[in-house]
Image: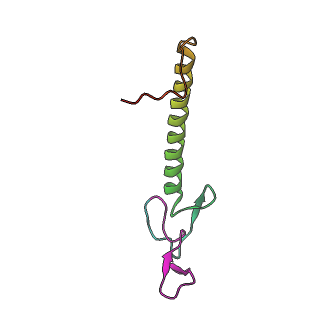
Amino acid sequence: MSAYYYSGCPDHYEAHYLDACSLCRKSLHNSDIFMYRGNTPFCSKDCRQEQMEIDGAREKNWKSGRSLRKSDAKSSTPNKTVRTGTVAVI
């Protein structure tokens, strides 16, 4: 596997997404590649597992923040008057 692929332009080469581990950036040339979520390459099971844990924590934080916003909306006074389309120019 080449470190670069030909993009069709004579003097223009770009790195391929399978050239390096997505977490530690280690070269994947002549080594096993561990994939995650379809197109994310890793150099080892450990790097892939670390990314899975990062994604899991991020998703958990996102969901907990989202549920807090929902509970805030439920606890707010439902009889508040809100005017839409009003602009104050000072």
Residue 7: x and y in percent read 56, 80
Image quarter hosting the C terminus: top left
Image quarter hosting the N terminus: bottom right
In-front residue for pair 45/85: 85
Residue 17 lies in the magenta-colored region? yes
Task: State how many labels appear.
Answer: 0
Residue 25: x and y in percent read 43, 64
Q: Residue at x 54, y 48 (%)?
A: 52
Using the rendered view, name the quadrant where residue 74 is placed. Answer: top right
Using the rendered view, name the quadrant where residue 67 is placed. Answer: top right
Residue 48: x and y in percent read 53, 55
Q: Which residues are magenta?
A: 1-23
In-front residue for pair 61/35: 61
Q: Residue furthest left?
A: 90
Q: Residue at x 51, y 61 (%)?
A: 44
Q: Residue furthest front?
A: 89
In-front residue for pair 64/84: 84
Residue 88 lies in the magenta-colored region? no
